[in-house]
Amino acid sequence: MMVCQALRWNAQAAMSPGDFPRSVGMRLAIVATTHLQEQELEQGLPLGHQAVGILAHVESTRARGYVQDLVTALAPWQQETAVADFVHHARTELALTG
């Protein structure tokens, strides 16, 4: 149910990253986290990469908090190489702690 609501919200809020990069990056991080909470790594990880790519160019504590939530949601897959690489990349690009 949560995934359906998040995806519906995502579709309604769709906009170009060039218009509002902070909003788009945060939206992507939220939808990615929702997928991960539903055990959908294949959908969540690519969205996470998009979010980090956009938010690396934005100064926002709030946005970084959403990416930190995403990193936390990846804990069940922390032994997978792609996940470890993503976590390292996110922490490096966004100066995340933990």
Image (cartoon, rainbow, N blue to C red):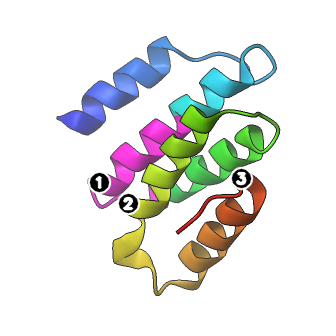
* In this rendering, position of residue 42 left or right of residue 58: left
In terms of secondary structure, where does tag 1 sit?
Answer: helix
Q: CA distance from mark 3 to mark 1?
A: 22 Å
Q: Amino acid at mark 1?
A: Gln
Instruction: Quadrant for residue 9, please give it.
Output: top left
Of callouts 1 and 2, which one flags the residue occurring earlier in the amino acid sequence?
A: 1
Q: Which residue is mark 1?
A: 37
* In this rendering, position of residue 15 left or right of residue 3: right
Of callouts 3 and 1, which one flags the residue occurring earlier in the amino acid sequence?
A: 1
Q: Contact, CB < 8 Å: mark 1 with mark 2?
A: yes
Instruction: Quadrant for residue 56, please give it.
Output: top right
Mark nearest the camera among 3 and 2 is 3
Q: Amino acid at mark 2?
A: Ala
Q: Nearer the viewer, residue 62 or 12?
A: 62
Residue at 58% across, 78% down = 84
What label does residue 94 carry, if any?
Answer: 3
Residue at 47% across, 19% down = 11
What label does residue 73 carry, if any?
Answer: 2
* In this rendering, position of residue 16 left or right of residue 78: right
In terms of secondary structure, where does tag 2 sit?
Answer: helix
Q: Amino acid at mark 3?
A: Leu
**What range is drawn magenta here?**
28-43
